[in-house]
Amino acid sequence: MGKGYKTECYPFWNLEDIKKMIDGFTEKKQWHWRLAFMTGLLLGRRVSDTLDLKWSDLFEKNGRKRSHLEIVEYKTEKATYVLIPALFWKEVELYIKEKKVDPSEN
């Protein structure tokens, strides 16, 4: 789907549903989907913007964590700055540990 298409969104209505999603990804060891879900949740971004993120968007070349993201929104083409919360970094660290990924190599 590209720009100009209408998509329907079904939001989560309570914390119990969000917890079920997180627990489901964790139990199935679906670390990629857990990180994608938590990224959208914690950064408040659309799925298209979340899935477009790269390690270089999160880390400086020297490996330092960025304090914010600059995202050009896919749907609106607006540039926005998003502060990265500490809880997001915990999710990134969990993903790195479980998947044995080195962001500087990817």
Image (cartoon, rainbow, N blue to C red):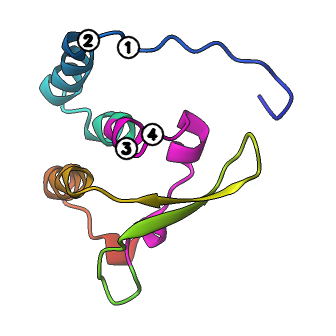
> Amino acid type of disc 2?
Asp
**Gap in Å between the C-alphas at discs 1 and 4?**
13 Å
Closer-to-camera residue (67/50) = 67
| Left or right side of 83 for 50 | right
> Amino acid type of disc 4?
Gly
Dots 3, 2 in contact, CB < 8 A: no
Q: Which residue corresponds to mark 3?
A: 39
Q: Residue at x 21, y 49 (%)?
A: 91
**Gap in Å between the C-alphas at discs 4 and 2?**
17 Å
Residue 12 numbered tag: 1
**Gap in Å between the C-alphas at discs 3 and 1?**
15 Å
Residue 105 drawn above or below residue 74: below
Q: Which residues are magenta?
A: 38-59
From the image, which quarter does the C terminus lie in? bottom left
Which mark is first along the chain, 3 or 4? 3
Q: Position of residue 41 (x, y in %)?
A: 37, 35
Q: Residue at x 22, y 26 (%)?
A: 22
**Gap in Å between the C-alphas at discs 2 and 1?**
6 Å
Q: Badge 2 local density, few (<14 within 10 Å), some, or many (20+)?
A: few
Q: Which residue corresponds to mark 2?
A: 17
Q: Which residue corresponds to mark 4?
A: 44
